[in-house]
């Protein structure tokens, strides 16, 4: 028994040291130490020895096993190091090759819709204007003919920054119209995309922060027909085909007359979840600019007229991409955002 173990130790160490590669080493490991291996076979015989010889034989067998296992580990490490050395120095390894590209971000669905709209509007001669998100009450409400007692000004709707000094988070992008008219004068064609803020309880269709795009045209002889044409062109550009539209009367303090523009649901012909079965989706409020607004911006309403419309960018992005909950848009969840590859 002792001799057999000694021979296995010698032979085994030599075989492991001589293994040329990792596959050969694995074969030796199975042959020597595997469940059907030579050492296991010897260990089984220990039980058949006379009782006096068993302890020593057992100790020796375990010592041989430990020695072989250590030699196996050492050889494995040596082979791995040699392979790495070969890979790094051999032909085919070029340290000047660029590494894998870092993961690139993608455009947010709102940014995509906004850019598409900006392209459409600039092609129609509009300028894209920007304005502050923290706004004066005067620009956000007064100049837009929204009276002091209008419910929209109340705390449950407007987020006030310094209410005693008339500073609020803008509740719509319309104050940019006011700023643009005062700055550029008439004639003017302008769109103003941006974030707006309301004190809203969040749910699937309401968020405290969302995106709008406001449009304004002021010139001599501007009428409802011009407005309809611009709106229809816009919708065709966004959805890639002409959509049937209709105007309903709507009331907004800054327009007179005011309208709600509905479009045929782009997703169905006989009612679906998006249009709530009606086949119409409410898309844009708009109308002819109220003379008081023109006056507040230093434009003579006897000489000039204009139209204005508001577009819910968040809502349009949801329609375009089939997003069913507005909270996804600004939730910052990468699993959502990664669904819109570049
Ligand atoms: Zn529908």
Image: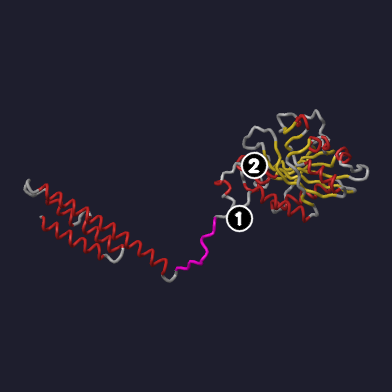
Q: Image point 73% across, 44% down: which residue?
A: 311
Query: Which of labels 2 and 1 is toward the front?
Result: 1
User: Which label belongs to residue 342?
Assistant: 1
* Image x and y of residue 97, in percent: 51, 66
Q: Is residue 285 magenta?
A: no
Q: Read off the magenta span.
A: 93-102
**Which residue is identified by label 2?**
274
Q: Residues within 10 Å of mark 2 (few under 14, many from 20)?
A: some
Query: Looking at this view, is 177 or 96 the one in front?
Result: 96
Ligand 1 visible in quadrant: top right
Q: Is residue 109 above or below residue 101?
A: above
For residue 180, side relative to residue 77 (left or right): right
Task: Judge the density around disc 1: few (<14), some (14-19), many (≥20) Cα neighbours within 10 Å.
Answer: few
Q: Residue furthest right?
A: 302
| Image quarter in which the N terminus is found | bottom left
Most frequent secondary structure within the magenta stretch: loop
Q: Quick one: 138 or 65, which is closer to the camera? A: 65
Seen in the picture, residue 81 relative to 268 is either above or below; the reply is below
């Amino acid at each position: 028994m002792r001799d057999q173990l000694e021979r296995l130790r010698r032979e085994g160490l030599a075989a492991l040291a001589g293994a040329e590669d990792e596959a050969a080493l694995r074969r030796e490991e199975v042959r020597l130490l595997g469940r059907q291996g030579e050492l296991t076979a010897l260990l089984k015989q220990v039980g058949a020895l006379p009782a006096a010889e068993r302890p020593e034989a057992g100790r020796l067998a375990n010592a041989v096993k430990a020695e072989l296992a250590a030699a196996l580990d050492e050889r494995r490490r040596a082979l791995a190091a040699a392979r790495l050395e070969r890979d790094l120095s051999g032909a085919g390894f070029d340290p000047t090759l660029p590494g894998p590209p870092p993961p690139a971000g993608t455009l947010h669905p709102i940014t995509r819709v906004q850019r598409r709209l900006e392209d459409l509007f600039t092609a129609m001669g509009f300028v894209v204007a920007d304005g502050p998100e923290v706004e004066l009450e005067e620009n956000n409400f007064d100049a837009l003919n929204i009276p002091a007692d209008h419910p929209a000004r109340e705390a449950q709707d407007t987020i006030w920054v310094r209410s005693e000094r008339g500073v609020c988070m803008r509740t719509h992008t319309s104050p940019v119209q006011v700023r643009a008219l005062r700055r550029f004068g008439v004639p003017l064609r302008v769109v103003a995309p941006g974030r707006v803020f309301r004190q809203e309880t969040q749910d699937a269709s309401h968020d405290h922060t969302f995106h709008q795009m406001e449009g304004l045209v002021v010139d001599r002889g501007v009428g409802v027909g011009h407005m309809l044409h611009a709106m229809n062109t816009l919708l065709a550009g966004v959805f890639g085909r002409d959509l049937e539209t209709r105007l309903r009367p709507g009331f907004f303090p800054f327009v007179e007359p005011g309208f709600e523009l509905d479009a045929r649901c782009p997703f169905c012909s006989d009612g679906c979840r998006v249009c709530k079965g009606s086949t119409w989706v409410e898309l844009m409020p708009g109308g002819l600019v109220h003379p008081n607004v023109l006056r507040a911006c230093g434009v003579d309403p006897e000489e000039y007229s204009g139209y204005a419309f508001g577009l819910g960018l968040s809502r349009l992005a949801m329609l375009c991409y089939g997003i069913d909950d507005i909270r996804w848009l600004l939730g910052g969840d990468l699993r959502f955002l990664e669904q819109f590859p570049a």
